[in-house]
Each structure stands twice: as C-alpha cells, then as structure tokens.
Amino acid sequence: MKNVFSRNIVFSISLVITSVFVILGVFFNTSLGKVTTTFLSAVTEYFGWFYLTVTLGFLFFAVILLFSKFGKIRLGTDTDKPAYSTLSWIAMLFSAGMGIGLVFWGVAEPLFHYVDPLSGKGKTAEAANYAIAYTFFHWGLHPWGIYTIIGLSLAFFQYNKNLPGLISSTFYPILGKGIYGPVGKTIDILAIVATVFGIATSLGLGTMQISGGLSYLFGLPNTINMQILIIIVVTFLFVGSALIGIDRGMKVLSNINILLALCIMLLLILVGPTAQIFKVFTSTVGLYLDNLIPMSLKIKAFGDNSWISNWTLFYWAWWIAWAPFVGSFIAKVSKGRTIREFVLGVLFIPTLGTFLWFSTFGGSSLHLVQNLGKTALVNAAKADVTEALFVFFDYFSIGPVLSIIALILVVTFFVTSADSSTLVLSIFSSKGNLNPSKKIKFSWGIILALVAMVLLLSGSLDTLRAASIAAAFPFAIIMTIMCYTLLKGLRKEYSKLPKSPMNDVEEKTDQKVV
C-alpha cells in the first residue's frame, strides 16, 4: 500500500482531502456546516440560472447527437461488439444511475409537491397533477441527459482515442498532453472528491432507510449501533461484489434489481388503483412534454425562488455531482455500441422506466390522499421520509409482502450503487486503468464505509450533502467544456469513416444541425 501512495499522487491527494474533511466534520461540524451551507446558498442564488441553462443544454446536445451523422460511430473499433446483453446493460445503467433514489422518493416526493406546490394552492387536484409532473421532471430526461454527455465523452476518448479512463482524458482536444500534467490531475482529483462525498452521503441515507424499515417492520431498534452494523454488512457485500468483478458481481446484482423492481411494481399495479396508475402515466407524460421548456427555465427574476432552489436546483447540482462516477461506470460497460444506441439506451429507456415507477408509486399514494382522503400518509411522510414507503404499503392487502420485497430491493440497489462507485473511484485513482487492482478496490470500499460511519456518528451528513452539491458547480463548467471537446473529437473521427453517397447527404443535412 505504501508503494501505491508514493506512486499515485491523485490517489494520495484525494485521500488526504477526504480525511481532512471528515476530521473537520467530526471536530468542527458546526463551523464547517455553516461554510458549506453558505457557499451552497450563494451558488444557487447567484448561479441558479446557470444550472438551469446548462442542464437543458446537455439534454439538447444529447438529442442532437442521436439524430446527427455521428450516431453511426461505434465506441471502439468497427469489430467491437457489446460485452453485455441489452437487458443487462440497461439494468446496470439503472442500478448505478439512480436506483436507490427511486425507492426512497417514489412515494414521498409527489406527496411533498402535492402539499407544497411551486405555485397555486396545495392539496388540490391541480396540485396532484403537477406534483407528478415535477417529479417526472426531476428524475426524467434532464438527469439522464447529464449522464449521457459525460458517459459518452468518457467512452469515446477511452475506446476511440485509446486514452486513460479519466475525466481529464475528455479534455485532450484542447489540452493535448497537458491532461497528464497538473491541470489534468486537478480535474481527476475533483472528480474523486465529489464522488466520495456523493456516495458516502448516499451510504448514510440508505443506511438510515434500511434501519427505519427494519424498525417499522420488525420492531428492531433504530439506533446508531444498528446503523453501523448495517454499514458493516453492506460493506462486506459491495466490496465482495467489487472484488469478483462486473460479470459475476455488478451484472448479477443489477439483473436481480430489475427483476425485484418489476415484481414490486407489477404487484402494486395489480392490487392498487390500476386504472388510476395508467391514467396518471398517460396524462403526466403529456403534461411533462408540454411544459418541458417552461419547467426547465423556471426561475423568478423577482420574488422568492426557495422552492426552485430546494428542489430543482438541488437535483440538477446533485446529478452533476454524481455524474463523474455514473458516467464513468456507463462508459465502462458500453464499449462496442454505436453512439445512436448509446443515447437511446442511456437517455430514453431509463427515463421511461422512471416514469412508470413514479406513476405507480406516486400515482397510488396521491390517489390514497386526494381521492380516498388518507391524509395520514402525508403526515407519516413528513414525519419520517425513511418510513414513508413502508407506511404506504400498509394500505394494501399484500402490504407485508411488498414491504419485504422493497427492503430487499433497497439493500440490492444500495450494494450496486456502492459497488459501481468503488470501481469508478479505483479507475480514477489508478491512472485510468479500466481493470484496477483488488488492493485499490478494497481500499476505496473500506474508505467509503468509514466515511459514512464517521458522518453518522458525528451527525454531519447534512454538511457532506451540502459540500457534494457545492462541488457540482465547477463540474458544471467542466461538462460545458466537455461538450465542445466531444464535438471536436467526433468531427475528427467522422472524417475517418469510409465515404459513401449517403455520407454526403447526411453531412449536408447535419451541418444545419451541428
């Protein structure tokens, strides 16, 4: 391990920064919390417009690439074929991208928007309609557009330009060999630190939800000792999965995730308000698409923007903070696919699955509250969001069965998210080696677990959450530049493709678009 520290400056500096932040979080939590919260507030207040415009820009750029002449470019050589079936590939995208978040917020977020909407009066039919629409908005095309851009950039420069699997490699068109120097290393360190903060926060929040579920279902004590025990068990699982590799670990777990998610969703559709669920899906997709641009740029030049800041800006910053690790993992499993396949698979299919999920869970919860008057569900969600899902299941005849499946699903999503982040951190701190050593994987797995434990003990999860969101600001700038470098690289790559009469037609057409 000593040799790893001495030879790998990116790993060493990242570890030092993480350790210092944890120490400050334990001994100076109040002061650190004030600093990070103040910085976060300043970023969202003065640069909220920037988050909104660049996130919409990433989505537009992804769609343009889908229909452009570059869509036929394969990630890798012409003879490379996808290493994973389409189903396994999508399952891994979904699990790494936002799986555990869907379980956590599937019931709660629509209820929060229903009670406290962006505009108009809460607890009305109109509030219910827009509650689902804004939930679609926060979890739909925009976050997957972010993941599409960074994942595609990493995959292209890794497989088509034979560069290391690092964020800095995407800057080769403008930095050249400078990606191996101080600027490139700084970019990679920022990616590692943002990933550690983001995943450690999720480990802590996921642990609390598992603990809350065990307490609600089985009466087990929801204490800090129970939460630490859960972290130890889950760490054993995700480190083991990371060590045995994607094919036997992440791939298998991701397939299990999808099967469990489909099972619980189909069961709820059958025993729940079936007609209402499909009505919610149909009407909300239309409402979402009709208001996509207005919602994307919704910020008041004059007046209070606290709702936008607490929800939309928070989500956009959160997805950007997570983008380095999610994008890198997506790139890792996407070699051999064309850019058109990549964009279709990463942008649209997970979005459709997300819409179905929130229509089922959010639509059913709002049906209980708005149509059947079960307002106790809202109070339960506001009192303890970690138990909202389990309280919701109590309203159905097979509630205990749904709760058990959901608890298992939380654990498996939890393990796959931690597994993928451990792999990506190992790649980032191994000079872009797509097959990092088991020592590095083991190290990062233990580090993530220790950070989560320390933060739970110190009560500084909110501080880390604020820091991870604030870290998204420089990454938003990095991703904006990344769009330019990707376009530049794709144009050069396209010029090498064999020419045909159709190429000429496509090129003339695409010049009007790109």
Image (cartoon, rainbow, N blue to C red):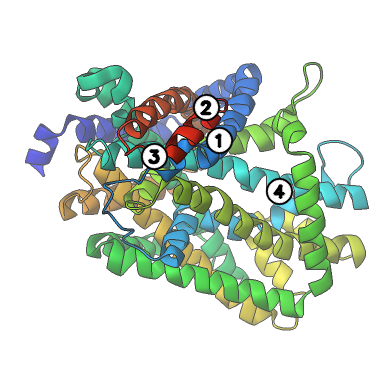
> Which of disc 4 and disc 2 is earlier in sequence?
4
**Residue denoted by label 4:** 135
**In the picture provided, is 48 more to the left or to the right than 145?**
right
Q: Give the mark count.
A: 4
* Contact, mark 1 vs mark 2 (Cβ under 8 Å): yes
* Contact, mark 4 vs mark 3 (Cβ under 8 Å): no
Task: Say what secondary structure mark 4 lies in.
Answer: helix
Residue 261 image point, x, y percent: 56, 69
Location of the N terminus (image quadrant): top left
Residue type at the position of mark 4 = Thr
Q: Name which residue lies at 81% across and 16% down.
A: 302
Residue type at the position of mark 3 = Ser
> Which of disc 3 and disc 2 is earlier in sequence?
3
Q: CA distance from mark 2 to mark 3?
A: 20 Å
**Residue denoted by label 1:** 64
Mark 4 closeness class: few <14, some 14–19, many ≥20 residues within 10 Å: many
265 relative to 325, above or below? below
Which of 472 and 26 lies nearest the eye of the viewer? 472
Residue 435 image point, x, y percent: 20, 51
Residue type at the position of mark 1 = Ile
Residue type at the position of mark 2 = Val
Please, which residue is most extreme toward the front here? 501
Which of 59 and 462 lies nearest the eye of the viewer? 59
Q: CA distance from mark 4 to mark 3?
A: 45 Å
**Residue denoted by label 3:** 500
Answer with the quarter of the image where residue 107 lies.
Answer: bottom right
